[in-house]
Amino acid sequence: MNTWRSPLTEALDAYREPCKSVCLGSLGAFNPKQKRGDPSDTAKPVLATCFSTMNSIHPCWCGRTDLAEFSAEYVLCESCQTLVVRNWPPPEHFDVVHDESDFYGRTYYESHLTQDFGLPSLEERARNDLNERCMHWMRTVLKYRLPPARTLELGSAHGGFVALMRWAGFDASGLEISPWLVEYAKSTFGVPMLTGAVEKQGLKPHSLDMILHFDLLEHLPDPRATMRRCMELLKPDGLMIFQTPCFPVAQTYEEMVQNKSRFPEMLKAPDHLYLFSRESVTRLFLELGAPFLYFERAIFDFYDMFAVVSTRELTPLGEEEATEALLRRPEGRIIQALLEANAQYNERGAQYSELTTQYHELTTQYHELVRRYEESEADRAARLHLLNEADAQIREIEAQRKAIEEVLLKMDASYQLQMSHRLARLLRRLHSPLKMDALYKAIEDRLASSNMADGVDGAHKS
C-alpha cells in the first residue's frame, strides 16, 4: 500500500535526510498508511515546521522553493504566479485552542482587523454585509444553483450569509475555527455551525451540493490539501464559489505603487499566506480535477477575483428561474426584495459614480479655463503695461515737440525782427542821394561794359 504523501512532500526530496529526525520526532501518532485527504491528517503543520527549520522562506503551494523577490513581506513563485508570505507563521498560528490569545481567536475580530487594518467591527459587518456583499454573492449563487441545495460556507464569520442562504431555501451551514465566533454566529443569526478545519469534520464524501468561501483561500497554510478535501465533499455535479485577492501578474511591486494600484492593500502579512493570480488558481483546481472555472465580477474588483469552480461544465440559470424559486417561500420573498433593493442601490451607485466622473471632468475643465483666463489676464496686463509705457513715451515726445515748437517760434520771431532791422537799414541807405547817384552810375557802367562786349562778339562773328 502506498504511504500518504503531502502535496508539499515532493519539495522535501532533496532535503529529506538532513531534516528526517526533526520531522519524524514531531509526527506523534502519524499513521504512515493514512490515505491522501484523510480528515484526521495531522502531518501538514509538521511539514511546515520542517520547512521553517530548513529554509527562511516557505515553499509555494505548488512545491517550488526557488522563489523570487517581490516586496519586503512577499516573494513570488514564477512557476505558478503566486505570492508567498516571506516570514511563515508557526504551526499554532493556524488553529484556535485558546480564543482569547490565539491568532484567529476572538481578538482577531474584535481588535486586530479594526485597529491594524481599519476595517469595520464584527457588529457593523453583521449589519452592513447583508445588503452589500451578501447580495452580490447571492446573485451569483442563484445564477448557478437553485434551492434546496446542501451548502457549506467555510469561514462564514458572523453567519449572516448562511442565514440569507437558509431564508432563500438552501440547506446551508457555516464553519469557523474560532469557538467564540461559532457561538457569535449561532446567537446572532441562529444558523447551524461547524467548529474547526474542514479536514477535521466528519462529513461524508459527495454529500454537498455547494461549498462557498469568501476571503478564505489566502489564509490557508495548505490550500491544495484543503481544496482537495472540499472537492471530495462535493457531489459529482456540485460546485464551489470563492472570492480571494487577485495578484495581477507581470507587474512589479514598484509598478503597482507607481500606478496607484489597490492590490498592495492585500499584502497583509502574516494574515495572507498565498495570494493567487488567475493563472495560479486555475492551475490549482485543474490539478484537483476541476477544469471549469467561471470568473464573475468581484464586488471589489480592483483587488479581488470571484469565481465558480466545477468538475463539469455549468450552464447559467435565468433570473426568472431564480425569482420563481425565491417566491415559493415567505422568507425567499424577503431575499427577492433585498436583491431588488440591492440592484437599485447598485444602479444609484453607478449613477453616482457617473456623476462623480462628470463632476471631476467638469472640475478639470473649470481649472483649465481658470488657467487660461489667468494666462489671458496676465497677457492682457502685460499688453496694458506696454500700452501705458507707449502712452507715456507719446506724452513725453509730445512735450518735447511742443518745446521744440516754442523754440522755433522764438527763433522765427527773432529772425523776423532781425530781417526788419536789416530792411530798415537798407531802405535808409536807398534813400540817401549820394548813394543813389553812385548806384545809378554803377549801373550805367555795367550796361556800357555789357554793350561793348556784345559789339566785339558780333565783329568776330562777321
Image (cartoon, rainbow, N blue to C red):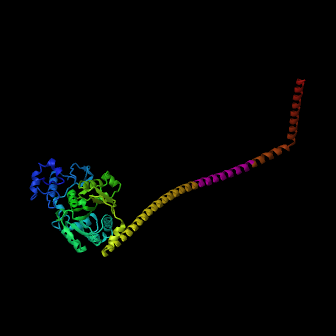
Q: Which residues are magenta?
A: 389-415
Q: What residue is rendered at 32% in x and 71% in y?
A: 326
Q: Quadrant of residue 208?
A: bottom left
Q: Quadrant of residue 146?
A: bottom left
Q: Is residue 151 above or below residue 384?
A: below
Tell me residue 245's x, y (percent): 29, 59
Tell me residue 274's x, y (percent): 24, 56
Tag count in the figure?
0
Is 86 in the magenta?
Answer: no
> Which sits in the foreground, 374 or 329?
329
> Which sits in the foreground, 383 or 12?
12
Q: What residue is rendered at 46% in x and 62% in y?
A: 362
Image quadrant occupied by the C terminus: top right
Q: Residue furthest bottom?
A: 330
Q: What residue is rendered at 83% in x and 45% in y?
A: 427
Is residue 372 in view?
yes
> Which sits in the foreground, 343 or 367?
343
Is residue 72 in view?
no
Q: Main secondary structure of the magenta part?
A: helix
> Which sits in the foreground, 220 or 409?
220
Tell me residue 149's x, y (percent): 26, 67
Q: Is residue 163 left or right of residue 318?
A: left
Is 398 in the magenta?
Answer: yes
Tell me residue 307's x, y (percent): 30, 60
